[in-house]
Image: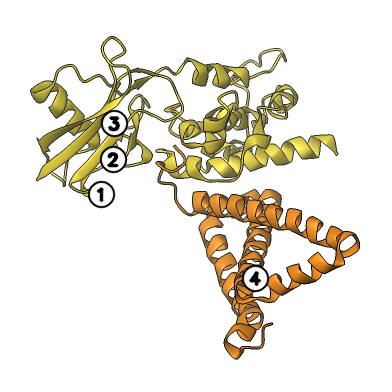
Amino acid sequence: MQIELRILRFDPERDTAPHWQTYNVEADPKFDRVLDLLHRVKYELDGSLTFRRSCGHGICGSDALLVNGRNRLACKERIEKLGRRISIAPLPGLPVVKDLVVDMDGFFESYRSVMPFLVNDDPLPARERRQSPEDRARYDDTTKCILCAACTTSCPSFWSKEAYVGPAAIVNAHRFIFDSRDEGAEERLQILAGDDGVWRCRTIFNCTDACPRGIHITQAILEVSSAIVERRT
Amino acid sequence: MLLRYRGSEGMLAWAFHRISGVAIWAFVVLHVIDIYLVGGNPGAYNELLKIYASPIGRVLEATLGAALLYHALNGLRIIVMDFWPPLTRWHKQLWYLCWAVFIAVGLPVAYIILKPIWEGTHP
């Protein structure tokens, strides 16, 4: 099947603004994914095309892109679902470095700002810090994040204010706030109660829809909001 | 980006919420002005009431009613999810429920507001 692939390209050394470039590529709709088409363009048609990818199997989170107007992982998105005309652009809301590669420094800065690590100053037990299956299940959903940024860059609140920590950072805060072994919840909730924290969420659900791991992101954000309110009462 | 991103029901629900919110705000401004006219310029107020009762005024009134109803119903949907976050898993169904109530309540109200137009009883 012939696919008309439109890619938003930008070379900071040559271009003043991004422009669309069209490639016609052969694809097998049953097996190929968007990443296969990008490889075909790069290997066979235009070696200058720049994009990120690592594992190619939906685990590393390197190849999140705007595919036909929605944030998707290129390695997971099947051609079968997309039709004969496919448009690919870099993730919205982040500065473009080149072609489909965006600068993710701000994204990871937001991630680090919520202390995404276990905080527990108690003396180390002889073996592991134990946890019941029920306590582990409390935050199971938010352990699945691969930091691809598909959620944060699909959020209109993030587009309007880049300082908003964004869904990905809140998901990773949720993972520790509700961990029974962690003692840093108070500090994290204080950070997320700020001007650029959870209250910027407008319950739009683009993040939940974009998450390639199927995390119920809006639910996690609202659980963190509730925890902030309960802390105050 | 707002117009280029193809969000699903959640994004549409939010967009309609914003648009209806702006429409309601515009009406509130107009309402403040017309109420001021009751004391400030009763003649102008009477003229304004005639515009409200005209066919165009009634269509605008029905639109205002639709905006108020949608904003209220979707606002309730958001409040419900705020209080019970697991309900976010059914946010699309809740939105469809909003539309069902919107039609059930909105259609009779629109009928009552617009009836004088085809009955020719408007001023």
- Name the residue beneath numbered marker 1: A81
Chain A in the picture: what colour? yellow
Could you tell me which residue is drawn at 38 percent across and 27 percent down? A61
Query: Which circle's residue, 3 or 1, is located before the other in the chain?
Result: 3
Q: Chain of mark 4?
A: B
Evaluate if marks 3 and 1 touch, with contact meaning CB atoms under 8 Å apart.
no
- Amino acid type at image mark 1: Lys
Q: Is residue B59 left or right of residue B53?
A: left
Expressed as whole percent of the image width and height from the top left, the position of residue A137 reads 58, 40
- Name the residue beneath numbered marker 2: A77
- Amino acid type at image mark 3: His
Q: Mark 3 or mark 1: which is in front?
A: 1
Q: Is residue A94 left or right of residue A76?
A: right
Q: Nearer the viewer, residue A122 or A68?
A: A68
Quarter of image, res A228: top right
Instruction: For marks 3 and 1, give the CA distance.
Output: 18 Å
Q: Chain of mark 2?
A: A
Q: Secondary structure at mark 1?
A: helix
Q: Are the residues flagged by discs 2 and 1 from a single subunit? A: yes
Residue A54 in sight here: no
- Name the residue beneath numbered marker 3: A57
Expressed as whole percent of the image width and height from the top left, the position of residue A37 reads 17, 33
